[in-house]
Image (cartoon, rainbow, N blue to C red):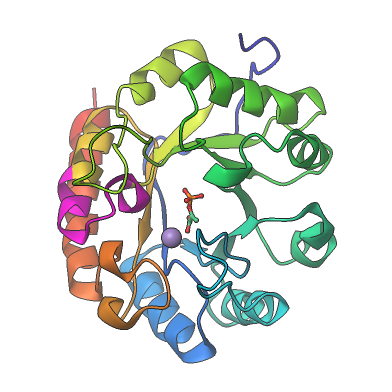
Amino acid sequence: MVKKIKQGPKVNINQPLIIAGPCSVENYDIMDKTVKFLKELGIEYIRGGAFKPRTSPYSFQGLGIEGLEILEDMKKKYGVKIVSEILDIRDLEEMIDSIDIIQVGSRNMYNYPLLKELGRIKKPILLKRGISATIDEWLNAAEYIALEGNTDIILCERGIRTFENYTRNTLDLNCVPVVKQRTNLAIIVDPSHGTGRRELVKPLSLAAIAAGADGLLIEVHPDPDNALSDGFQSLNFEEFKDTYNKVIATYHCVNTR
Ligand code: PEP
Ligand code: MN
């Protein structure tokens, strides 16, 4: 049961929180192109993993510190805010100044020492749902952070593992109204990991907003077919623009009374 979380971060109810960018920070040019495009569209929060939790140890593991430096360059050049994943608590010191929202990935949702440490800092935490976590387990993970003092927590539904294997995961939109009814936390939805198929990202983005989500996390890449990670679920610029415009229209439709 969630006991301590009375107050989540202030979300702007006039607009959804949209976090977009490539799965991984691959190099300066790709990041520069992507951030320029997103900024022109009005996106304020840029994502990009410098430390990547890959299922195979032989897959691209991220650029590490070099990736963080590229993210910092983007912040300075475009005045955007940065969302990036922490894998290891030993990286916190390197990340704390440049990262505006620290992402805890699905694989780390049960890492209680990491959650507690993040509870002691003053930075918003984006807490992704564990791949097979129940809503209660997920809210308890949020509680681990909140109990240490940091209640600036945004939950992110990113799909759970089910028997269905057409999609990478099954996006559980049930959890959106459940979380809204049980907590004051903001909840956003990640249809990229939630489906693992780029052609499903737009319809599930709209469904998430219709279900009451406060925002979305979407993977975007200038050349998805050649991305170093998660290209199959990344939108190209044109697809993102179309999705974004429809998301904004749907959000205003759902949230005006
Ligand atoms: C990601 O956001 O790129 C990521 C690795 O997400 P998840 O932890 O949901 O798999
Ligand atoms: Mn990814």
The quarter of the displayed image where residue 14 is located:
top left
Q: Which residue appears farthest toward the bottom when viewing the image?
A: 29
In magenta, the rendered stretch is 191-203
Q: Point out residue 131 in the picture as x, y percentages from the top left corner.
A: 46, 38
The residue nearer to you, when weighing 54 against 6, is 54
In the rendered image, residue 214, in percent from the top left (x then y), is placed at 39, 36
Q: Residue at x 22, y 56 (%)?
A: 197
Residue 23 percent across, percent down from the top left: 44, 66
Q: Quick check: 89 left or right of 67?
A: right
Q: Is residue 209 left or right of residue 184?
A: left
Quadrant for the C terminus, please: top left
Magenta span contains residue 199 = yes
Residue 51 within the segment the image draws in magenta: no
Say above or below: 56 vs 176. below
- Could you tell me which residue is drawn at 36 percent across and 25 percent down? 176
Answer yes or no: is residue 252 visible.
no
- The relative height of residue 201 versus residue 117 in the rendered view (above or below) is below
Q: Quadrant of ligand 2?
A: bottom left
Quadrant assignment, res 90: bottom right
Q: Position of residue 65 (x, y in %)?
A: 72, 77
Q: How many numbered dots are placed on residues in this image?
A: 0
Query: Is the stretch drawn in magenta largely helix, strand or loop?
Result: helix
Residue appearing at x 66%, y 35% in the figure: 152
Residue under the point 79% across and 62% down = 91
On screen, 195 above or below 86? Answer: above
Say if residue 19 shows up in the picture: yes
Q: In which quadrant is the N terminus drawn?
A: top right
